[in-house]
Amino acid sequence: MKKYKIKNAFIGFNKNNFSQKSFKFKIIFYFYRFKFLILLLILYLMILILAIIKNKPKLIHNNIEKKIENNSNIKSNIDLNDEFFQIKEVQEQIKSKNLTYINTIFGERNKVGNALMTLNNLINICENIKCKNIIIPSGLTPIIKNPIFYKEYNINIFPYSYKNKIKIDIQLNTDTIFRFRYRKKAHNIELQVIKNELLNNIPKYKGNPNDLIIKIRSGDIFIDHMEPNYSQPPLCFYQKIINNCKFNDIIILSNGHENPVVDELIKIYPKIKYLEGAIELAIAIIINAFNFVMPMSTFPRYLLWLNSNLRNLYVYEIGFYHFKKSNYTIHIMKPSQKYLQVMNHKWKNTKEQLNLMLKENCINSKMTSYSMS
């Protein structure tokens, strides 16, 4: 009955009386009288906004592709004195394709860590020779899905899906591009340029200052890829960190159980959380970690350049560990002489090495800490 009275009150409304009502009441009256038109207008605007959002990437992509077509008349950027052009594979492609300008370069790696390192090298090269386009390695397909414009150097970074859509001038599919460094110039880490695109394609994860994230390398180097430089830390290294520091949650990220340390840690510390695979979630955890234990692996090494939370980095000093990002504390444990003799640059996944990883004693091993501010 109450609703009925309100309805009739609006139908028989006196215009003279209305001028005496409050502004708020006027709004209510006009909304009720024209509600269908207002709702239709709102619906139309919502559809229009959704259409603009949906088509925006296409417009960006089309604009970038137009830029590509307009680069053909630019002055040659080939300088045979440059270290990049001294690579034999590069010289062969310039000659066979009769190139006068390097517009687009591509380097292939199918694993995330190696692909990040390769992309960083491609960006460094493109900055130096002033090329315009990079096609990223296939290993980054899950996390880079849209083109990125690197405004500072006027470089377009294209997802791997563009490989067959854009003419590639220089294509390097070997370790050449992965290991390339300018000897006479600083090796800049330029991965911040992909951070926004990466964050759009991984799960949302909020790091906890009281959690410890442990990345353990497993998989290929324990199966069929015996890379001499990829010896891994022993069990006691992880135990010393866990026992000497108080953490709420301890999360192990790994790509399998082939590394014997994984199962031993889970057995010793039943409350440990273990995550295998789930590459996008692993990336989200690493770039948001506050306390991180580093393995011998390029995967976390390059992702940590995108981490603005990092407070403590734990490293076992075997092989490379250098990491120049500032505002954190690095804790380094030196291996025993025996561990170095058996492991350092000698990884072959032998029974002796696997046994030593579990039996090595770190009681006398000190953890040295340095502030990287």
Image (cartoon, rainbow, N blue to C red):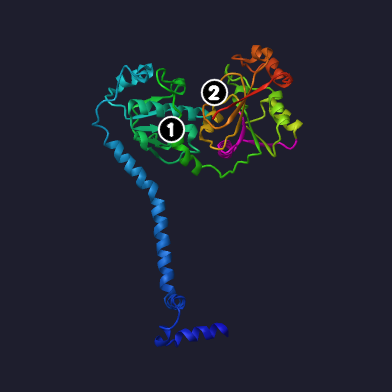
62 or 313, which is in the foreground? 313
Give how far across and how far down residue 307 sits, in percent: 54, 36
- Characterize the local packing of mark 2: few (<14), some (14-19) or many (20 or more) Cα atoms within 10 angstroms: few
**Displayed quadrant of residue 219:** top right
**Residue on which disc 2 sits:** 322
**Residue on which disc 1 sits:** 136
- Characterize the local packing of mark 1: few (<14), some (14-19) or many (20 or more) Cα atoms within 10 angstroms: many
Element marked by disc 1: loop
Which is closer to the viewer, label 2 or label 1? 2
Horizontally, residue 305 falls left or right of residue 251, namely left
One can see residue 176 in this view: yes
Horizontally, residue 63 falls left or right of residue 206, namely left
20 or 141, which is in the foreground? 20
**Displayed quadrant of residue 92:** top left
Horizontally, residue 191 falls left or right of residue 261, namely left
One can see residue 111 in this view: no
- Amino acid residing under circle 1: Ile
- Amino acid residing under circle 2: His
Give how far across and how far down residue 322 sits, in percent: 54, 23
Give how far across and how far down residue 165 sits, in percent: 36, 36
Rounded to the nearest angstrom, the CA distance separating label 2 from label 1 is 25 Å
Give the magenta range: 270-293
248 or 12, which is in the foreground? 248
Q: Earlier in the sequence, mark 2 or mark 1?
A: 1
Eyeballing the image, is 76 above or below 192?
A: above
Q: Which mark is residue 104?
A: none
Q: Which residue is found at the position 49% from the left and 44% from the top?
A: 200
29 or 349, which is in the foreground? 29
Task: Give the position of the C terminus as an image quadrant.
Answer: top right
Q: Is residue 272 magenta?
A: yes
Task: Give the position of the N terminus as an image quadrant.
Answer: bottom right
